[in-house]
């Protein structure tokens, strides 16, 4: 009997907790793509390639653990330039780290969608283009995440 | 009398208006569309999310269900090779019919019931308890192991809640001295919820079990047996299966409001314009009850089948019996 009473009280408390959240909601969802969370320094998003800095040493392709980075050698040239295959890339950042010229940069963009699988394989020319976040292009507001004692996470315009 | 007047009179007579418009089909459809949306919104609020939003954003995505329904409508209805085809098609129709039948006995307002009968409460319960048989048939004829598991679960659950619900209503019937729903409203000096809280509680739990809402959505068990008896159904018939539980819940909520929340009292003055409008209060109460049941989804996880059965037989059945005895006691004290 005591057991039953205790479990009944437990149920009532569970429902009360639920009701409290219902009446005082604590929303944490960010309205992507209208809002976009500002990412921290050192975030490893899509990679950008700066051909003018590159000395075509091939280290990036050599270090890539996923076999995503590949050197593309043009006709008549001896050494190639890197292109990336995002089907394979695991965004480890080794390529950017090893590059002696800092010709590779990990950007903070990660929300790009590709229509076809082939589109995910970038040639050196495509690789050299600026990486743009489609949400930002359409005017998303950047917000930053702030930890708060009472509410957990709060998002404020950055 | 012109043809037009005749049609109008027919349409506004309780025998047609109550089951078709209010509180029957048309209202049930609106309830269905809004309650599913409300359930998702409520769960989202409690879980720190937003819920449906982008369909009619200005109104918080209230038309989401209409969009989903339209999608169901245009999906292909697949009849599996291994199913018992005749029954497979027939069972959902039967289930829907059984779920709509109770509205024939539920009065919308004083003197406004399609079938006025001294045993109306029993009529509602009897037709409601016919629906599980159709669900059983749905699962069985699908010829799919998940569907059959779901069907067997439905059979187990039916055994667990049916007696509880019937006994709870019996307790109220004893208390009011009648099983006529209209009469029951008149006999409530104070709401039945206060007269016999035990019966109200057991009826409520039985109702949640019967409608298969959380924590008792064991029959569907989305994560275990992927919608159970409805697993092979697609397109609009799947939509019907989904709506079935809510229809049952709606009928039960109306019954709950009549038996325990003093129905349409206080009667609104527009009653004199057209009787069923006075029943608006009843609708508001029933809707509030439904919202509460929908809210439970965000609080509870699912019970295991054996836990639900144990609760049904070991706790709620004795409680329901106790409520009958309590009724006898209250009857002597209050009604003399
Ligand atoms: S981030 Fe890692 S996996 Fe991706 S291309 Fe660079 S080295 Fe390869
Ligand atoms: S490591 Fe740097 S410099 Fe060497 S090929 Fe790769 S991008 Fe060019």
Image (tube, coloured by chain):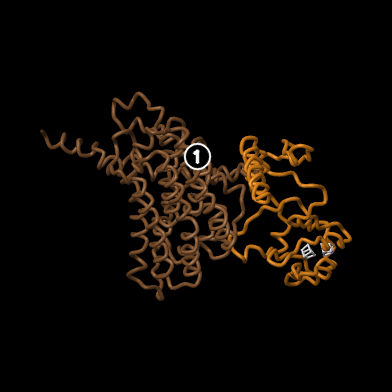
Q: Which residue is mark 1?
A: B196
Q: Choose top left, top right, bottom left or bottom right for residue B14.
A: top left
Classify mark 1: helix, strand or loop: loop
Q: Front-most of B231 and A73?
A: B231
Residue at coordinates 48% horizontally, 47% vertically from top-left? B203
Q: Seen in the image, is B179 located left or right of residue A120?
A: left
Q: Front-most of B233 and B132?
A: B132
Residue at coordinates 54% horizontally, 46% vertically from top-left? B40
Horizontal and vertical percent position of residue B42:
57, 42
For mark 1, name the chain.
B
Horizontal and vertical percent position of residue B49:
63, 44
Q: Choose top left, top right, bottom left or bottom right for residue B254.
A: top left
Position above or below: B184 against B157? above
Q: Would you say residue B124 is visible in this rendering? A: yes
Give the color of chain A as drawn: orange
Q: Front-most of A3 and B302?
A: A3
Horizontal and vertical percent position of residue B29:
38, 45
Tell which quarter ligand 2 is in. Answer: bottom right
Horizontal and vertical percent position of residue A40:
80, 47
Q: Quadrant of the C terminus of chain B?
A: top left
Position above or below: A63 against B18? below
Residue at coordinates 57% horizontally, 49% vertically from top-left? B297
Q: Quadrant of the N terminus of chain B?
A: top left
Pointer 1 local density, CA inside 10 Å: few below 14, some 14–19, many at least 20: many
Residue at coordinates 76% horizontally, 61% vertically from top-left? A91
């Amino acid at each position: 009997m005591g057991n039953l009473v205790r479990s009944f009280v437990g149920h009532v408390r569970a429902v009360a907790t639920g009701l409290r959240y219902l009446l005082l909601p604590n929303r944490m969802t960010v309205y992507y793509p209208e809002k976009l969370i500002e990412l921290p320094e050192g975030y490893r998003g899509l990679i950008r390639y700066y051909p003018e800095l590159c000395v075509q040493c091939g280290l990036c392709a050599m270090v890539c653990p996923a076999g995503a980075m590949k050197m593309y050698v043009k006709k008549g040239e001896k050494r190639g330039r890197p292109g990336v295959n995002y089907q394979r890339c695991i965004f480890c950042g080794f390529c950017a780290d090893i590059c002696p010229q800092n010709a590779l940069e990990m950007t903070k963009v990660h929300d790009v969608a590709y229509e076809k699988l082939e589109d995910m394989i970038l040639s050196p020319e495509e690789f050299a283009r600026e990486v743009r976040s489609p949400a930002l292009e359409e005017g998303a507001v950047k917000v930053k995440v702030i930890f708060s004692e009472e509410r957990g996470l709060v998002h404020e315009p950055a | 009398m012109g043809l037009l007047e005749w049609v109008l009179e027919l349409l506004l007579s309780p025998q047609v208006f109550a089951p078709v418009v209010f509180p029957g089909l048309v209202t049930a459809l609106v309830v269905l569309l809004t309650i599913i949306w409300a359930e998702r919104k409520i769960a989202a609020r409690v879980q720190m999310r937003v819920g449906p939003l982008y369909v009619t954003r200005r109104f918080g995505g209230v038309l989401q269900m209409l969009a989903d329904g339209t999608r169901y409508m245009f999906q292909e209805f697949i009849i599996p090779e291994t199913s018992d085809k005749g029954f497979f098609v027939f069972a959902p129709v039967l289930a829907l019919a059984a779920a709509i039948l109770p509205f024939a006995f539920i009065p919308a307002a004083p003197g406004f019931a399609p079938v006025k009968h001294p045993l109306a409460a029993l009529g509602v319960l009897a037709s409601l308890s016919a629906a599980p048989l159709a669900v059983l048939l749905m699962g069985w004829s699908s010829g799919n192991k998940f569907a059959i598991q779901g069907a067997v679960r439905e059979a187990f659950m039916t055994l667990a809640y049916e007696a509880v619900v019937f006994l709870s209503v019996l307790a109220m019937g004893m208390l009011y001295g009648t099983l006529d729903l209209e009469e029951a409203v008149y006999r409530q000096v104070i709401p039945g919820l206060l007269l016999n809280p035990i019966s109200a509680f057991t009826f409520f739990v039985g109702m949640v079990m019967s409608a298969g809402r959380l924590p008792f959505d064991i029959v569907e068990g989305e994560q275990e047996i992927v919608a159970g008896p409805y697993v092979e159904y697609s397109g609009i018939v799947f939509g019907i299966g989904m709506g079935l539980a809510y229809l049952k819940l709606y009928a039960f909520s109306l019954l709950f409001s009549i038996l325990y929340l003093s129905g349409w009292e206080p009667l609104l003055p527009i009653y004199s314009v057209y009787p069923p409008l006075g029943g608006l209060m009843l609708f508001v109460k029933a809707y509030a009850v439904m919202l509460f049941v929908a809210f439970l989804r965000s609080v509870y996880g699912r019970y295991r089948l054996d836990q639900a059965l144990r609760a049904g037989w070991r706790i709620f059945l004795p409680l329901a019996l106790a409520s009958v005895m309590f009724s006898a006691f209250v009857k002597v004290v209050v009604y003399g």
